[in-house]
Image: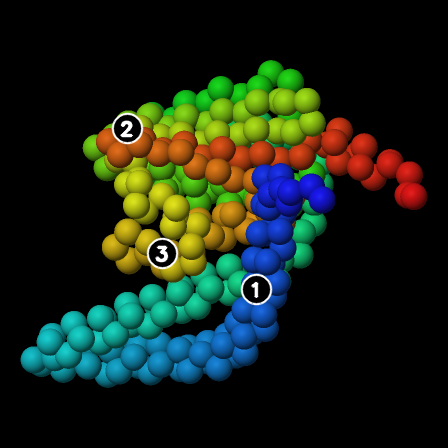
């Protein structure tokens, strides 16, 4: 009897993705209930804090109380943001895919982040495939995933640096790289960056990169990362090309 062999990497990745999808489906059910139970009290809390702030605004000697109220409002906003991030991560994703030019989508995002990059002394470079590769994407969701990577890259270069976005038109897929010359990720943290709630950033929720991976995987894509402390980080995204997706849809059923 032949010795049992390990499944190929593609099969292992697909099994891991399906396991995460199943887990997220259960989390999504909990998220819906959590949103209902927390959003209304948080809104009421914020409103009452604002009313108290108005009542105290003209009273002498109320500066300390107003400072405390401002802190409470800030924390209420932070809790709401954390809840919204969790709902985006664990909630149900309904894709509305279209035939999208990956290069054009990237150019739109580069225009959007350019002022922030310029303020951070980050030079944004592009090397976009002349073949203008296309994939079927939900434009809004995929922009959200890619924006997370671009903003993380800018924030990783506090002293300035280069951010390079590159696309490659392969035979049956589109390959996209987002690379920076920032501080890099330590070897002990690298395997954990896609784990929910893992973060090394002050004030971060730890849901940005897990949400990015989930959106990419919902598009039948794959994201991997390489990083070297002190030299930068590079994310690699693979997406099915439109030609590959069309070939699948035209394959006769058996």
The answer to whether 78 is drawn above or below residue 34 in the figure is above
Q: Quadrant of the N terminus?
A: top right
Q: Could you classify mark 3 by the number of other residues whose Cα lies within 10 Å: few (under 14), some (14-19), or many (20 or more)?
A: some
For residue 116, which quarter of the picture? top left
For residue 132, which quarter of the picture? top right
Position of residue 243 measured from the top left corner of the image (x, y, whole percent): 75, 29
- The answer for how far apart the CA atoms under marks 1 and 2 are is 35 Å
- The answer for how far apart the CA atoms under marks 2 and 3 are is 22 Å
**To which residue does mark 3 refer?**
198
- The answer for how far apart the CA atoms under marks 1 and 3 are is 17 Å
* Residue at (57% x, 28% y) in the render: 175
Compared across the picture, whether 54 is left or right of 110 comes to: left
Dot 2: what SS? loop
Position of residue 235 measured from the top left corner of the image (x, y, whole percent): 45, 35
Q: Quadrant of the C terminus?
A: top right
**To which residue does mark 2 refer?**
231
Q: Is residue 6 visible?
A: yes
Q: Is residue 110 visible?
A: no
Compared across the picture, whether 157 is left or right of 225 comes to: left
Q: Can you tell which of label 1 and label 2 is closer to the viewer?
A: 1
**To which residue does mark 1 refer?**
23
| Residue nearer the viewer, 35 or 249 | 249
């Amino acid at each position: 009897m032949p010795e049992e062999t390990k499944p190929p990497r593609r099969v292992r990745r697909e099994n891991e993705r399906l396991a995460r999808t199943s887990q997220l489906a259960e989390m999504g059910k909990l998220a819906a209930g959590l949103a209902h139970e927390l959003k209304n009290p948080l809104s009421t809390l914020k409103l009452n804090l604002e009313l108290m702030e108005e009542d105290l605004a003209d009273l002498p000697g109320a500066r300390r109380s107003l400072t405390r109220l401002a802190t409470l409002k800030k924390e209420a906003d932070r809790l709401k943001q954390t809840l919204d991030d969790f709902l985006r991560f664990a909630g149900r994703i309904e894709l509305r895919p279209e035939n999208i030019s990956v290069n054009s989508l990237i150019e739109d995002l580069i225009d959007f982040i350019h002022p922030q990059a310029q303020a951070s002394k980050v030079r944004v470079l592009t090397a976009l495939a002349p073949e203008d590769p296309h994939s079927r994407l939900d434009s809004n969701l995929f922009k959200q995933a890619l924006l997370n990577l671009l903003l993380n890259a800018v924030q990783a270069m506090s002293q300035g640096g280069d951010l390079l976005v590159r696309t490659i038109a392969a035979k049956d897929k589109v390959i996209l790289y987002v690379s920076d010359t920032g501080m890099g990720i330590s070897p002990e943290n690298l395997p954990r960056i896609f784990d929910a709630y893992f973060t090394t950033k002050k004030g971060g929720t730890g849901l940005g990169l897990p949400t990015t991976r989930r959106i990419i995987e919902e598009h039948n894509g794959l994201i991997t990362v390489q990083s070297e402390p002190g030299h930068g980080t590079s994310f690699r995204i693979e997406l099915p090309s439109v030609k590959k997706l069309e070939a699948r849809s035209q394959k006769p059923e058996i």
